[in-house]
């Protein structure tokens, strides 16, 4: 798990502690500290180089912060999707090797002009795949040493939340708080009560698979490739636009929807998909109509539960907004349906969804965290 459950959990020390613990577990002689040497007066005029390698995207970005206004100078993402597609998921050691190969190139592209004067390096230290995280952390440490720069440790989930504020004036960002954040990525599904920047409380989370993982695993069953989310979404959209009559009448459970807590569970849905698939003939399994109808119902089942629990949390907390984030936030149906339901059921609550390009992993969001503390 990535966040503390305490009301006033702070991410930064947690993330640093996490890396230290992992490093020590790996090598008992290893002592590791990230120093934050940024002076208060520099905080309002910063150029940040950020690095993200928590999973299968090698990312670097440069952000300029002046008088609380943020400008993205560059945001480079080198995706390893094609490489991992044949395994139907991310193969950590292959991802690590690719990060090692790609980081110098991605860094060079992000540092567009050689005259760019960076003041601070921000790097993701967790949660994520450990071999991948270490590649980014070690690269950032080497750079920090060479460039004599301070380095800060960034929590990936918090960065996903803050991706919603890219391009917005931070002076006004507080108007959105407190908020309920629906974090939906490949590794996490959480409902977080965000009282302030640096004040988060997890109020619910998945007990097994994450929503993105469910998209990925069910897409794999259907032979739609990796990543599964966009593939399922595409099939579902084709179904709605082209196929008039639903032939197979597929219906999957909405796991835990009626339970009183804010937790989720998606592994049963994956199993239900597998059982339905197995009971069909080979001909049907390969038919376009069946795949489309499966995609529609999988997407609906996931979205129904996410929206139901988010609105339930929103109604029982005094909040000003609902914030959607993480890779699954790129899903058009989820974005639109959540928006419609908020307008209908909780019209006084504002709604934030990230720009699609900042929904999935990127380094621009990693540079955002530092700005709040
Ligand atoms: P990570 O889980 O490593 O933090 P991301 O935050 O980038 O990575 O999320 C990746 C997840 O988002 C994957 O499971 C992917 O299938 C899912 N995803 C991406 N785009 C969509 C989409 N349009 N619809 C549903 N899921 C999506
Ligand atoms: Mg992510």
Image (cartoon, rainbow, N blue to C red):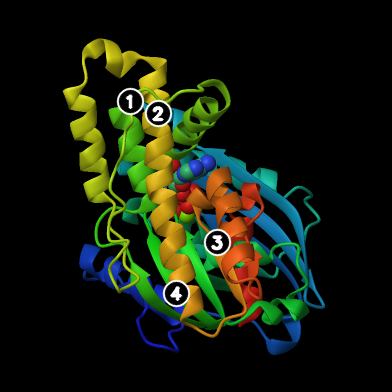
CB within 8 Å, label 2 to label 3: no
Name the one closer to the observer, 232 or 17. Answer: 232
Secondary structure beneath disc 2?
Answer: helix
> For residue 313, which numbered disc appears in the image?
4
Secondary structure beneath disc 3?
Answer: strand
Question: x%, y% of residue 324?
Answer: 55, 61
Q: Disc 2 and disc 3: Cα gap in Å? A: 26 Å
CB within 8 Å, label 1 to label 3: no
Secondary structure beneath disc 4?
Answer: helix
CB within 8 Å, label 1 to label 2: yes
Q: Can see residue 276?
A: yes
Secondary structure beneath disc 1?
Answer: loop
Q: Is label 4 or label 1 in front? A: 1
Q: Disc 1 and disc 2: Cα gap in Å? A: 7 Å
User: Looking at mark 4, is its residue's CB closer than 8 Å to ligand 1?
Assistant: no
Q: Is label 1 or label 2 in front? A: 1
Question: x%, y% of residue 277?
Answer: 24, 27
**Label 3 belongs to which residue?**
324
Quarter of the view holding residue 295: top left
> For residue 293, which numbered disc appears in the image?
2
Question: Could you tell me how many numbered marks the image carries?
Answer: 4
Quarter of the view holding residue 169: bottom right
Q: Disc 1 and disc 3: Cα gap in Å? A: 32 Å
User: Looking at mark 2, is its residue's CB closer than 8 Å to ligand 1?
Assistant: no
Looking at the image, tell me whether mark 2 or mark 3 is earlier in sequence order.
2
Is residue 147 left or right of 21 when viewed as pictured? right
Q: Is label 3 or label 4 in front? A: 4
Q: Disc 3 and disc 4: Cα gap in Å? A: 13 Å
Q: Disc 4 and disc 1: Cα gap in Å? A: 34 Å
**Label 1 belongs to which residue?**
248
Residue at 66% x, 45% y is 108
Residue at 50% x, 75% y is 314
């Amino acid at each position: 798990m990535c966040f503390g459950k305490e009301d006033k959990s702070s991410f930064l020390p947690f993330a640093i502690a996490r890396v230290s613990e992992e490093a020590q577990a790996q090598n008992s002689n290893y002592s590791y500290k990230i120093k934050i040497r940024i002076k208060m007066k520099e905080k309002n005029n910063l150029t940040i180089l950020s690095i993200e390698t928590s999973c299968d995207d090698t990312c670097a970005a440069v952000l300029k912060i002046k008088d609380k206004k943020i400008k993205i100078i560059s945001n480079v993402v080198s995706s390893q999707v094609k490489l991992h597609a044949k395994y139907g998921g991310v193969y950590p050691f292959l991802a690590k090797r690719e990060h090692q190969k790609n980081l110098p190139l991605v860094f060079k592209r992000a540092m567009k002009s050689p005259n760019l004067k960076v003041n601070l390096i921000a790097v993701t230290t967790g949660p994520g795949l450990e071999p991948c995280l270490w590649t980014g952390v070690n690269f950032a440490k080497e750079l920090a040493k060479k460039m004599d720069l301070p380095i800060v440790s960034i929590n990936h989930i918090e960065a996903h939340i803050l991706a919603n504020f890219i391009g917005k004036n931070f002076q006004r960002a507080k108007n959105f708080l407190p908020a309920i954040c629906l974090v939906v990525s490949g590794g996490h599904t959480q409902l977080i009560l965000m009282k302030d920047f640096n004040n988060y409380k997890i109020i619910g989370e998945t007990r097994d698979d994450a929503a993105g993982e469910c998209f990925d695993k069910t897409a794999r069953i259907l032979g739609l490739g990796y990543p599964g989310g966009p593939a399922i979404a595409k099939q579902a959209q084709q179904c709605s636009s082209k196929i008039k009559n639903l032939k197979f009448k597929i219906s999957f459970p909405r796991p835990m929807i009626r339970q009183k807590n804010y937790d989720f569970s998606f592994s049963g849905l994956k199993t239900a998909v597998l059982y339905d698939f197995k009971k069909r003939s080979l001909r049907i399994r390969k038919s376009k109509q069946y795949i489309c109808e499966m995609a529609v119902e999988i997407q609906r089942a996931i979205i129904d539960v996410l929206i139901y629990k988010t609105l339930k949390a929103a109604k029982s907390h005094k909040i000003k907004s609902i914030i959607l984030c993480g890779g699954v936030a790129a899903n058009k149906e989820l974005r639109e349906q959540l928006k419609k339901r908020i307008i209908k059921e909780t019209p006084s609550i504002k709604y934030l969804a990230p720009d699609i390009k900042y929904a999935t992993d990127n380094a621009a969001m990693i540079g955002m965290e530092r700005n709040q503390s």
